[in-house]
Amino acid sequence: MSRPDEYRRSKWTRDHASRLRRTPDTVAPIIYPPERAISEEYHLWDTWFLRERDGSIAEVDGYRVAFSLSASSSLLPGKRHDEARIRYFYSTDGREWTYGGPIFPEGEAFGSRQWAGSALLDDDGTVYAYYTAAGHRDEPELTYEQRICVGAGGTVSTDEHGLAIDGPWEQSVLFEPDGVRYQTQEQSNRQNGPIYTFRDPWFFEDPATGESYLLFEGNTPIDDPDPERTYNGCIGIARSETGDPTDWQPLDPILDAERVNQELERPHIVVRNGRYYLFTPSHLHTFAPGLSGFDALYGFVADSVFGPYEPLNETGLVVANPENAPFQAYSWLAFSHGDEILVTSFFNYFDLNGLSLDDVALLPEPEQFRRFGGTYAPTLRLQVGGDRTRIWGELDYGQIPLERESLTPPDHIRYRGSGGDGEDEDGNY
Ligand code: FRU
């Protein structure tokens, strides 16, 4: 296995990406508006779960906890990133979610707004809420600097009324781009390229070594004015030598997408059968000139956390929105459940009839509201074998089955009478 000081970052290449095509195994079923959104009061988008060190979803006295980026549902959907705050929801059955409250008291967290992160329930019961600080507190105008932060020291409690997460939190900025391994905003501005990224910390404990890591979305510094080269998304990694969840040293990126894609968002790893599946959602509009991809979940597989990673399904495509609903979901998050991998996301824009995400802002405001989901999408079921994946079914909107709940094969598989194990002729699944 590669040691952290020896690895060479893996590449998502133009050759991989130039072969991106939707396939029956990678296209998600169409999403229809749900009868009821998770919240009437808030738009909800990027979502993650309270997890244990080993990555499993925590169950506290029978409750599971979801954290979502949120903004008032009276806000124009396209403006939500400017006012994002993290709010939490809890559930006993993994279907009905009850609103708990904002994770941090007003004005306490870093940033003028908070973007995606992850949440660790440590073995001693302490909650570490990782997040991205976007901009700066109390700034007169919106700015876009991004820093990786944590609120440490929270506690979870339950009583007959439900679940609560409380502080006091110790807020700290964990690290910022150094300009050598990771591009700073200033370097990115000088290049005049697409908007820079440095965000979305995701806690991961390597089962092979017990070492703790934070993955995150970044860009690699590039000193080259070629417009193709300004697309420089990468998946960053930091290590905690002591295991202390507040003490991180950024290392070289584990994967980069130079000249391929600008944004490798919310990177996360699922370990199965000793293999490391690295997932990242990305957008159609962040592919470099000359390439065309999709708003989709992309993935890679390796034998260790440091790679070398190969793209899944040859190109990296794992879950694509359908061609006639290309922006219906985003911000996919994969996690293990029994023999399969489940993938959550949020219901994004629908009924766009050929409009792009940028065009949405040109629609009359009531239409912008009408065509935005802003709630949890149906959970997808994925089969994974080696470097192949296949969407084979879906669950309810925002459904997170309990760990002990075993899922029956999807209906179409049962009706087909394949025996339900989903295995193909090659025995891949
Ligand atoms: C993905 C994303 C994240 C970011 C958030 C901001 O949906 O771009 O990378 O943290 O949205 O709203």
Image: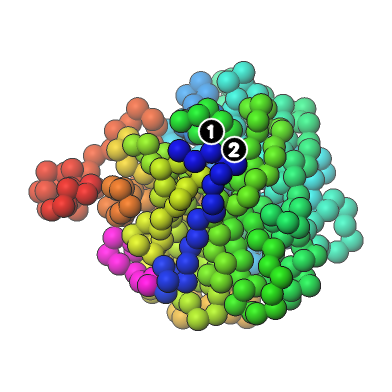
For badge 1, the amino acid type reads Glu
| Residue 391, label in figure | none
Residue found 42% across the figure and 39% down from its top: 271
Residues drawn in magenta: 19-31
Around disc 2, counting alpha carbons within 10 Å, would you say few (fewer than 14), some (14 to 19), or many (20 or more)? many
Residue 326: percent from left, percent from top? 44, 71
The residues tagged by marks 1 and 2 sit, at their Cα atoms, a distance apart of 6 Å
Element at label 2: strand
Residue 87 visible in the snapshot: no
Residue found 50% across the figure and 60% down from its top: 11
Residue 197 visible in the snapshot: yes
Magenta stretch encompasses residue 71: no
| Ligand 1 found in image quarter | bottom right
Q: Which residue is mark 2?
A: 213
For badge 2, the amino acid type reads Tyr
Residue found 65% across the figure and 61% down from its top: 220
Examine the image and state in which quarter residue 408 appears.
top left
| Main SS, magenta residues | loop
Residue 213: percent from left, percent from top? 59, 38
Residue 190: percent from left, percent from top? 78, 72
Element at label 1: strand
In depth, the one of 282 and 262 nearer the eye is 262
Residue 154: percent from left, percent from top? 69, 27
Residue found 69% across the figure and 56% down from its top: 182
Around disc 1, counting alpha carbons within 10 Å, would you say few (fewer than 14), some (14 to 19), or many (20 or more)? many
| Residue 205, label in figure | 1
Relative to residue 158, is residue 186 drawn left or right?
Answer: right
In depth, the one of 62 and 389 nearer the eye is 389
Do the numbered discs 1 and 2 sit on residues whose CB atoms are within 8 Å? yes
N-terminal-most mark, 1 or 2:
1
